[in-house]
Image (cartoon, rainbow, N blue to C red):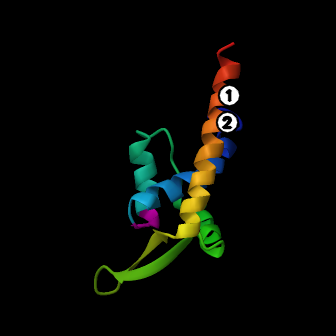
Amino acid sequence: MARGRSNFKMGTVEMLVLYLLSKRDMYGYELSLMIKELSEGDLIVMESSLYPILYKLQDKKYISDREESTGKRRIRVYYHLEKSGKDRLSDLLEDYRTTSQGIEKILSN
């Protein structure tokens, strides 16, 4: 792994989580799997890194959670994107696209 790649990737996890939750409610492990699957394995977010981000997003009221029973003793926590989270996602996507375009312009010279 290239030096610094992990920090760059982790800076985008919030955006990816909000984006995936804009499609439908998901539980933490499912979010981790979807990031890996949709990136074709290029991005891997371990649950140990994901849950602190989910908790931060909850604290900021960007997402909420609900519990569902999935068996006799299992409870799964699903995360839901709130209106403020949609606004945050819009801001993050705009920043990401502007930054990506700027980087591409520099790298193409």
| Quadrant of the frame with the C terminus | top right
Residue plotted at (63% across, 33% down): 100
Q: How many marks?
A: 2
Q: Which mark is residue 99?
A: 2
Residue plotted at (44% across, 41% down): 39
Q: Determine crowd level at label 1: few under 14, some 14-19, many 20+ residues with C-alpha closer than 10 A.
A: few
Q: Can residue 25 be seen in the rendering of this structure? A: yes
- Label 1, on which residue? 103
Give the residue type that dot 2 points to. Answer: Thr
- Whether the magenta-drawn stretch holds residue 84 is answered as no
| Image spot of residue 8 (x, y percent) | 67, 42
Give the image quarter of residue 38.
Answer: top left
Secondary element at image label 1:
helix
Residue plotted at (41% across, 54% down): 33
Nearest to the observer: residue 32 or residue 59: 59
Q: Determine crowd level at label 2: few under 14, some 14-19, many 20+ residues with C-alpha closer than 10 A.
A: few
Q: Can residue 74 be seen in the rendering of this structure? A: no
Q: Which residues are magenta?
A: 25-29
| Image spot of residue 66 (x, y percent) | 44, 80
Position of 81 compared to 37: left or right?
right
Nearest to the observer: residue 88 or residue 68: 88
Q: Is residue 81 above or below residue 67?
A: above
| Image spot of residue 93 (x, y percent) | 58, 47
Whether pointer 1 and pointer 2 mark residues with C-beta atoms closer than 8 Å, the reply is yes
Q: Which mark is residue 22?
A: none
Give the residue type that dot 1 points to. Answer: Ile
Q: Is residue 25 above or below residue 7?
A: below
Give the image quarter of residue 101.
Answer: top right
In the displayed orientation, state which residue is furthest to the top. 109
| Quadrant of the frame with the N terminus | top right
Secondary element at image label 2:
helix
In the displayed orientation, state which residue is furthest to the left. 71
